[in-house]
Image (cartoon, grey):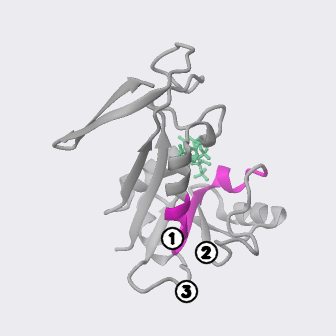
């Protein structure tokens, strides 16, 4: 079974995005770790909406560090239409269809970088939460790497509190018990 790491960053109040961008949730440390993980990947998985977003930089554009990293766009929708749309915007991303039943098979068949060090057959998923949790549900052995920023994000997507506030926090303790993680913060 191929190693699959799903990378997600969230705020302390459970937002995956601010105004539709994950950058508002990320921090410098999160970004450093995200880039380091990306560079170890022998292939990347992204979702259809990320792949077709013209405002995002092309991950494996010629001349970039990830030029030789295959980028796979997994979709439950029509992969031929998606392939045409990717062609139209001129990106070297590969459209692949999956169903819940075929997900493991599809991940196992994805092309990976030829120059990757032996033993590091690592696929990294950089999708949003919908595809991420689909992979977690249907790919046995998938790992979720959850990065939690010390940020409170107020958006329409932050369901659990309507408070409009900018609260700067410092993490002062991390404790685990069984599979529960306790994060203790104090105002900066
Ligand atoms: N915090 C993070 O780490 C992180 C990372 C990436 C993006 N984001 C943010 O998360 C938000 C959502 O990201 P996203 O839309 O790019 O990726 P997403 O949450 O993975 O959803 C995109 C794709 O998932 C599929 N999907 C399956 N079930 C769905 C459902 N019930 N609702 C919607 N889509 C479903 C659809 O693809 P098919 O129809 O093709 O199957 C859709 O195009 C954005 O605001 C993005 O900026 C956060």
The C terminus sits in image quarter: top left
The structure residue drawn at horizontal position 46% and vertical position 33%, both measured from the top left corner, is 150
Q: Which mark is residue 115?
A: 3
Residue placed furthest toward the top = 163
Work out how far the residue at label 3 is from the one at label 2, CA to CA, in angstroms. Answer: 9 Å
Q: Depth check: 184 or 94 in front?
A: 184
Q: Is residue 89 left or right of residue 167?
A: right
Height in image: 70 above or below 154? below
Residue 37 magenta-highlighted: yes
Q: Residue at x 48, y 59 (%)?
A: 99
CA gap, disc 2 to disc 1?
8 Å
Mark 2 highlights which residue? 69
Write down the region rendered in magenta: 35-54
Q: Secondary structure at mark 1?
A: loop
Quarter residue 57 falls in: bottom right
Point out the tag, 2 or 1, that comes first from the N-terminus.
1
Residue 36, image x and y in percent? 51, 63
Q: Which mark is residue 113?
A: none
Residue at 73% x, 50% y: name it. Answer: 53
**Secondary structure under badge 2?**
loop
Q: Quadrant of ligand 1?
A: top right
Residue drawn at x 61%, y 74% is 70
Q: Nearer the viewer, residue 106 or 99?
A: 106
Neighbor class of circle 2 (other Cα within 10 Å; few <14, some 14-19, many 20+) is many
Residue 48, magenta (yes or no): yes
If the image is split into quadrants, where does the N terminus sit? bottom left
Quadrant hosting residue 174: top left
């Amino acid at each position: 079974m191929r190693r699959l790491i799903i990378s997600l960053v969230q705020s302390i109040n459970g937002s995956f995005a601010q105004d539709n961008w994950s950058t508002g949730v990320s921090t410098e440390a999160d970004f450093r770790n995200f880039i380091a993980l990306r560079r170890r990947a022998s292939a990347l998985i992204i979702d259809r909406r990320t792949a077709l977003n013209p405002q995002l930089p092309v991950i494996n554009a010629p001349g970039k560090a990830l030029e030789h990293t295959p980028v796979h766009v997994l979709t439950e929708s029509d992969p031929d239409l998606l392939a045409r749309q990717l062609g139209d915007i001129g990106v070297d991303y590969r459209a692949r269809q999956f169903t819940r039943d075929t997900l493991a098979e599809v991940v196992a068949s994805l092309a990976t970088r030829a120059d990757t060090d032996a033993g590091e057959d690592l696929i990294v998923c950089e999708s949003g939460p919908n595809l991420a949790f689909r992979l977690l549900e249907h790919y046995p052995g998938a790992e979720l790497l959850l990065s939690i920023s010390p940020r409170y994000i107020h958006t329409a997507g932050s369901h659990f509190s309507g408070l409009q506030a900018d609260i700067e926090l410092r993490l002062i303790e991390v404790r685990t018990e069984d599979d529960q993680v306790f994060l203790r913060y104090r105002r900066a």
